[in-house]
Amino acid sequence: MGSSLISSTQPGQAAALISVSASSPLLIGQDSLTVVYSGDANYRTSTSRAITVQVGYPTNTVLSSSNPTVPVSTNVTFTAQVTSSQSGGPTITGNVLFRIDDSAGSSVPLTNGTAQFTTSFASSVPSVHEVSARYSGDQNYIRSRALLQEGVVTPDFTLSDSLGNVGNLVIGAPGDSSAPVTLTISGTNGYNGTIVFSPASCVVTPAGSLSSCSFSPSSITGSGSTQLVIDTTAPHAAGTPRTFFGLDGRTLPPIAVCLLFLITQAVFKKQRRLSLVFGSVILLALVGLWACGGGAGSGSATTNTIPGTPTGVPYAVSINAAPSGVNSHSINLTFIVR
């Protein structure tokens, strides 16, 4: 090892270059260096304080990600591989400090020159993180560092239908059903949620369409398709039920018959023959009224006609796919009944 004066910065100061030759190398590991100034005709000799120098083989750290664009809340593993160009050297030991952005980091020991760190991201904000791996070095190898950019995305899906840009359905008559419409769920960024379709997933406006939606299958996990059918209502008659029987238009249920008979027996308790005769007459009269459909005020059943789904009215249908905790998506179409 030798030294030589390389410059004089200003009066009373100078700089020297210390060189290490292959014939007289520093020892691997930590070396203590001291500089001695020999002095001259004007200045006395002096000795510097000792400094520690780490001497070792150079290393190279390569950092990789198991998924460079990872979905939210999904594990990702970072791998640091530490190598050296020194052939036949000792085994590389030490630790690798993994840091994400400005975090404190996690220190992982090397195993066969490799260290791994697994984590996940709770949010896609920010969408890009800087990940670093710092090899600490050991008694034989000097430290090195590697960086990469890790992307974070939110799993999502798209919703489309087989009608394309047309979006219109024509149903032949009230009571008929529409042709099946294929709804397609396409998961993106690792989406694997389950979407459940029910009649509540379908909103028809304006009100009064007397229609409903059905889906087959009723749920999709990840990606897939379901068949949507819109069912309408046909005109039909709705009758008003007959009364049991009535007197002056008032309904008289069977229990009233029993009560009248018992009251008659109580009133004519002492005149047993008369009570039996009178009670039997009342009972027969009431049964007669019942069999004939009632007395005055009770007649045949009335009939109401329900018109069914109105014709010629354009209805808007909104299909909403909204699994819990995930962005919802919807599509719109229309139908009309001829």
Image (tube, rainbow, N blue to C red):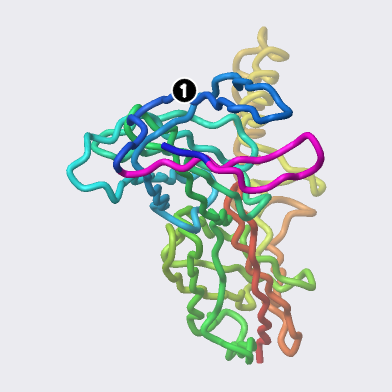
Hey, which residue is sitting farthest front in the picture? 41
Above or below 107: residue 22: below
- Residue at the farthest top position: 270
Farthest residue to the left: give it.
88
Q: Is residue 188 left or right of residue 295?
A: left
- Tell me where residue 333 appears, x and y as whole percent: 66, 80
Q: Residues within 10 Å of mark 1 (few under 14, many from 20)?
A: few
- Front residue of this view, candidates 322 and 120: 120
Q: Which residues are magenta?
A: 4-22
The spot of residue 87 in percent (x, y) is 21, 47
Would residue 21 be counted in the magenta stretch?
Answer: yes
Residue 256 magenta: no
Residue placed at 59% from the left, 87% from the top? 171
Q: Residue 54: in sight, yes or no?
A: yes
Q: Secondary structure at mark 1?
A: strand
Question: Quarter of the image holding residue 59?
Answer: top left
Name the magenta segment's main secondary structure: strand
Nearer to the camera, 66 or 29: 29
Query: What x and y, as percent, mark residue 8?
Result: 72, 45
User: In the image, what residue type sits under mark 1?
Assistant: Ser
Q: Going 56% across and 25% down the picture, which residue do you hit?
A: 36
Question: Which residue corresponds to mark 1?
Answer: 32
Percent x, y of residue 138: 36, 29
Q: Quadrant of residue 302?
A: bottom right
Q: Assign the N terminus to one quadrant of the image.
A: top left
- Left or right of 119 on screen, residue 271: right
Towards the viewer: 237 or 245: 237
